[in-house]
C-alpha cells in the first residue's frame, strides 16, 4: 500500500487527479470506478481543469459509480441542491464539464423496481467492460467504502444496503440540510457495490481529508481487518492500492513518519 500525505485538501486533490489522469493518458478507454461525497469534489475540479486547459480526453473513458440512494434518481427539473441523487452529483461535479459519452457512464439506478436484478446486471456490466482499472474511494466515518456499512461481508457484491445513523447524520450535514430536506425524509437504503466487487478493481485509490477522518483512517490502515470497518479490506488488497491523505486525516497514524520516509525513498529512487 502506498501512503501519500499532502499538506492540505487542495494538494491531496491535485495528487489524486494526477494519478487518475495518468491512467487515462496511458489507457484512453480505461474503466474508472468513481465515488461521490465531499472528498472527491476537489479531485473532480482538477480533472475538469486538466480537460479544459490541458486537453485531458475522456471521450473513450468508461465509468462505474460505487453507489446510489434507493428511491432517488436524477431530476433536472429540480435545482441541484434539492436533487440529492448521486447521479446528479456526478453530472454537476464532473460529467457535464468534460467530454465523456453518456453511454459510457454507469451509475446504480436508484429508481429501479427490481433492485436485486439490477444489482446482478450492474455486476455483469462491470465484467463486460473488462473490470475496473482504477477505483476511486473515500472512507466514511463509520469506516465504510461506498455504502458497505459495518457488518457488511468483506466478500459482498453489489446489493441493497441499509444506512447507519452515522452515515445518515454525516450526509445530512454535508448535503441534505442545505437542501431543506428533513433528516427523516432522507433515503435510508442504497444500492452499493460490495467490498468483494471493489477488491476486484485492478488498482485502488483511496482519499481522506480533515481531522474528522483521522480516527477511522488509522483504524482502516493500522487496525485489524474487520467487517466493522469495511475499508480495512484495503489490507487484503493484492493490487496496487494508493492512499492519499491530507495531514489532518493522517495525524493519528502510528507509523506516519515511516510512511513518509517510504514515500520519499520511492520518489528519490523511483522504485
Ligand atoms: P465524504 O464521504 O467524502 O462526504 O466524507 C466519504 C464516504 O462516505 O465514502
Image (cartoon, grey):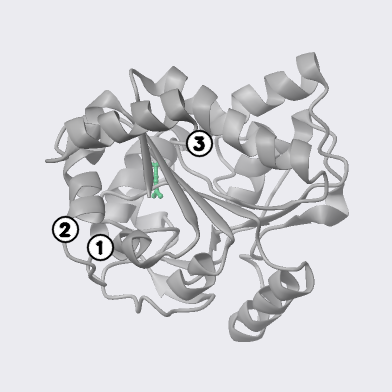
Residue underneath mark 1: 229
Tell me the residue at 33%/18% (across/down): 7
Instruction: Name the N-terminal-most of marks 2 and 1.
Output: 2
Q: Nearer the viewer, mark 2 or mark 1?
A: 2
Q: Position of residue 204 (x, y in %)?
A: 50, 53
Task: Quadrant for residue 255, please give it.
Answer: top left
Q: Position of residue 10 (x, y in %)?
A: 45, 18
Q: Could you tell me which secondary element the residue under label 2 belongs to?
A: loop
Tell me the residue at 55%/59% (across/down): 66
Q: Is residue 192 above or below residue 182?
A: below
Front one among 240 and 267: 267
Mark 3 sits near ligand 1, with its Cβ under 8 Å away: yes
Mark 1, other Cα within 10 Å: few <14 / some 14–19 / many ≥20 = many
Task: Quadrant for residue 110, please give it.
Answer: bottom right
Tell me if residue 206 can be seen.
yes
Determine contact: label 2, label 1, CB under 8 Å. Answer: yes
- Which residue lies most toward the top here? 53
How far apart are the alpha carbons under marks 1 and 3?
20 Å
How far apart are the alpha carbons under marks 2 and 3?
24 Å
* Left or right relative to 176: residue 25: right
Numbered mark located on residue 40 in the image: 3
Amino acid at each position: 500500500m502506498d501512503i501519500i500525505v499532502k499538506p492540505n485538501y487542495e494538494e491531496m486533490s491535485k495528487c489524486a487527479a494526477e494519478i487518475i489522469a495518468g491512467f487515462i493518458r496511458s489507457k484512453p478507454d480505461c474503466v474508472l470506478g468513481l465515488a461521490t461525497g465531499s472528498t472527491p469534489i476537489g479531485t473532480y475540479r482538477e480533472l475538469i481543469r486538466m480537460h479544459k486547459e490541458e486537453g485531458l480526453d475522456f471521450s473513450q473513458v468508461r465509468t462505474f459509480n460505487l453507489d446510489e440512494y434507493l428511491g432517488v434518481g436524477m431530476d433536472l427539473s429540480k435545482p441541484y441542491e434539492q436533487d440529492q441523487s448521486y447521479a446528479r452529483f456526478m453530472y454537476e461535479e464532473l460529467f457535464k464539464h468534460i467530454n465523456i459519452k453518456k453511454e459510457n457512464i454507469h451509475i446504480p439506478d436508484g429508481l429501479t423496481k427490481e433492485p436485486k436484478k439490477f444489482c446482478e446486471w450492474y455486476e455483469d456490466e462491470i465484467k463486460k467492460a473488462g473490470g475496473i482499472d482504477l477505483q476511486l474511494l473515500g472512507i466514511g466515518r463509520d469506516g465504510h467504502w461506498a455504502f458497505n456499512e459495518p457488518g457488511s461481508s468483506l466478500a459482498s457484491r453489489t446489493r441493497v444496503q441499509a444506512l447507519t445513523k452515522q452515515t445518515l447524520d454525516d450526509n445530512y450535514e454535508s448535503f441534505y440540510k442545505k437542501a431543506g430536506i428533513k433528516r427523516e425524509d432522507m433515503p435510508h437504503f442504497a444500492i452499493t457495490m460490495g467490498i468483494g466487487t471493489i477488491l476486484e478493481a485492478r488498482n485502488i485509490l483511496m482519499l481522506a481529508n480533515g481531522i474528522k477522518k483521522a480516527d477511522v483512517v488509522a483504524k482502516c490502515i493500522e487496525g485489524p481487518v474487520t467487517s466493522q470497518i469495511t475499508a480495512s479490506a484495503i489490507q487484503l488488497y493484492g493490487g496496487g492500492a494508493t492512499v492519499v491523505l491530507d495531514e489532518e486525516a493522517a495525524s493519528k497514524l502510528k507509523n506516519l513518519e515511516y510512511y513518509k520516509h517510504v514515500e520519499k525513498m520511492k520518489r528519490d529512487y523511483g522504485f
